[in-house]
Image: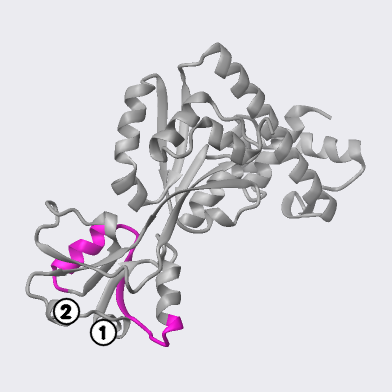
Amino acid sequence: MKLQQLRYLNEVARQDLNITNAAEVLYTSQPGVSKQIQLLEEEIGLQIFQRNGKRLTGITEPGQQILSLAAKVMQQVDNIKRVGDEFAHIETGTLTIATTHTQARYTLPAAVKAFMTKYPQVKLNLHQGNPKQVAEQVASGDADMGIATEYISDLDNVLCLPCYQWNRCVVVPQGHPLLLDAPLTLKKLASYPLITYDFGFTGGSLVSKTFSDAGLSPNVVLTAIDADVIKTYVSLGLGVGLLANMAYDIERDANLVKVDVSHLFADSTTYLGVRKDAFLRSYMYGFIELLAPQFNQQAVNAALKIGA
């Protein structure tokens, strides 16, 4: 059994059983990947993949266990490389963060700026997606850490650190009739055409559940993943905007009036997630502390049970 074979297995699984795509990522040939997988199956005496001709169509029951172990082996190989880099190249490296648009646009800039000043030789990559995509990137190792409100806290192999809580506001143009409809209730809010996040984004499912629990069906006329898009269409008079409080800028959004609605919805928590089995470089600890000062290296290690 060769490490190369496990790497091929892992990549084929990551590419949804598409050997051609896996070969491209691995900078090798499709026949070469197929041959190494077949050799491994012959060596262990088990079929890992189900096949229809030359095409992989599924994963066998023992194959599921083998792929899980192969992924763990590759994670540990990556950790060994990180240990080497930590001591040989302590000031250089790459940090990949998966996050949602709202977090990237409104809460991360200060931490990112401070990080780039403190670690000028570290390359920082930001990958934007919905909370589910953020969680998947962390779980698979495609991102070193993920920052999101939902989904990411549901994964067994990801440690989630609660960074901060936030709530929501309504935004409307000047003179909108909602401004005369105080106090604002869920029932009143549901009577207006609503422009808000896609319910898979930024606490959206909590909003949906809140209306549902009250026996209400909001009149959602438009959804978006981008708070700036929501505000644009609110400015056009197409509806009432419901978005995260942090997404309202008193100067930039001076054409809109903000109405706090934290009395209508429960607080949402933004989490920072890292894989429990990942080796964290010193600059990764540094970014975590810049974003959430309550989590210094000692606190993160305690949560990971490192040294316990």
Q: Which residues are magenta?
A: 212-237
Residue 66: image quadrant is: top right
Asked whether residue 286 is drawn in magenta, I would say no
Q: Categorize mark 1 by other alpha carbons within 10 Å: few (<14), some (14-19), many (20+).
A: few
**Residue plotted at (35% across, 60% down):** 225
In the rendered view, does 135 fall on the left or right side of 255?
right
In the rendered view, does 182 fall on the left or right side of 131?
left
Image position of 268 with respect to 293: above or below = below
Residue 264: image quadrant is: bottom left
Q: Label 1 amino acid? A: Lys
**Residue plotted at (67% across, 43% down):** 12
**Residue plotted at (77% across, 41% down):** 69
**The C terminus, quarter of image:** top right
Q: Categorize mark 2 by other alpha carbons within 10 Å: few (<14), some (14-19), many (20+).
A: some
Q: Secondary structure at mark 1?
A: helix
Residue 62 placement (x, y as % from top left): 84, 51
Q: How is the image coloured?
A: one colour
Q: Label 2 amino acid? A: Leu
Disc 1 to disc 2: CB gap under 8 Å: yes
> Mark 1 to mark 2: distance in Å?
9 Å
Residue 188: image quadrant is: bottom left
Q: Which mark is residue 178?
A: 2
Residue under label 1: 188
